[in-house]
C-alpha cells in the first residue's frame, strides 16, 4: 500500500490530547494542504482561521459546548490547543459547503501524515451565525458572507485512538 493510502487507512479521530502544542511549521503545512483542496469551479470558497490563542480556543470551545447542549465543563475540543476553523464564502460557489468539507478532510489527512492528531468537530455553522461568532470574526477583521463549515482540532494524541472496522455493503459496482 502506498504512503497516501496508508495515511487514509491510519487516520483516526483523536478525543484526548496531550498538553504539547503543535509546532507552527506543522500547522502551516496542514493549513496549506487544506487550501489546496479541490473546489467547485475553482471557486476556492473556504478560508481557514488558525486559532492558537488559549483564550479564544476556550471561548470557541464553550460556544460549541453550548450549541451542542452539553453541561458546563465539557470540552468538545478534547483539550486540543490548535483549532482550525473552516468557513466558506457563500457567494464564491454553489459548492461552498462541500468545498469546505474537502478542506477539512485534506487537513485531517495532512495532520496524520505529519504525526499530529486531529478531529473534525461540527457546529461551526451555529457558532458563527450567532452574534458572538460574528463579533469574533469582526474583531479579527474577517469579512464576507461566511458560513462555518467545521473545526479541525489538532494536537498530539494522549493514547491510542479506537479503531472501528468499516461496515460491509458500502461499495457497489456497475460494470
Image (cartoon, grey):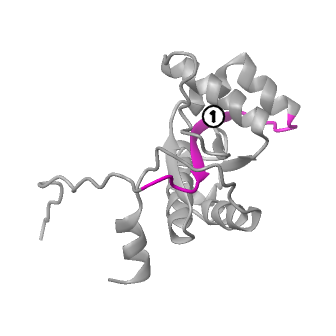
Residue in view at x 63 percent, y 34 percent: 147
Q: Position of residue 65 (x, y in %)?
A: 56, 23
**Quarter of the image holding residue 62?**
top right
The part of the chain drawn in magenta is: 140-159
Q: Position of residue 87 (x, y in %)?
A: 65, 41
- Lateral position of residue 9 relative to residue 26, left or right: left
Residue drawn at 38 percent across, 66 percent down: 10
Above or below — where is 155 with respect to 24? above
Indicate the position of residue 99 as horizontal and vertical percent values. Answer: 54, 51
Residue depicted at 37% across the width and 75% down the height: 5
Viewer-proximal residue among 109 and 26: 26
Q: Which residue is mark 1?
A: 147
Name the image quarter holding the N terminus.
bottom left
When asked about the image quadrant of residue 123, the answer is top right
Q: Is residue 142 left or right of residue 32?
A: right
Other-residue count near label 1 (Cα within 10 Å), few / some / many at <14 / 14–19 / ≥20: many
Residue 40 visible here:
no
Say if the magenta span includes residue 19.
Answer: no
Amino acid at each position: 500500500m502506498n504512503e497516501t493510502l496508508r495515511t487514509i487507512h491510519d487516520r483516526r479521530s483523536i478525543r484526548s490530547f496531550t498538553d504539547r502544542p503543535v509546532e507552527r511549521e506543522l500547522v502551516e503545512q496542514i493549513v496549506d494542504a487544506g487550501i489546496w483542496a479541490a473546489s467547485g469551479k475553482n471557486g476556492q470558497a473556504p478560508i481557514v482561521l488558525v486559532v492558537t490563542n488559549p483564550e479564544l480556543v476556550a471561548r470557541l470551545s464553550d460556544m460549541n459546548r453550548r450549541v451542542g447542549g452539553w453541561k458546563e465543563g465539557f470540552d468538545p475540543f478534547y483539550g486540543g490547543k490548535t483549532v482550525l476553523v473552516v468557513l466558506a464564502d457563500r457567494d464564491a460557489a454553489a459548492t461552498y459547503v462541500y468545498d469546505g468539507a474537502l478542506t477539512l478532510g485534506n487537513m485531517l489527512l495532512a495532520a496524520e501524515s505529519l504525526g499530529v492528531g486531529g478531529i473534525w468537530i461540527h457546529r461551526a455553522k451555529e457558532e458563527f451565525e450567532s452574534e458572538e461568532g460574528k463579533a469574533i470574526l469582526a474583531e479579527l477583521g474577517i469579512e464576507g458572507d461566511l458560513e462555518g463549515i467545521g473545526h479541525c482540532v489538532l494536537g498530539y494524541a494522549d493514547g491510542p485512538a479506537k479503531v472501528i472496522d468499516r461496515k460491509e455493503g458500502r461499495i457497489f459496482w456497475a460494470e
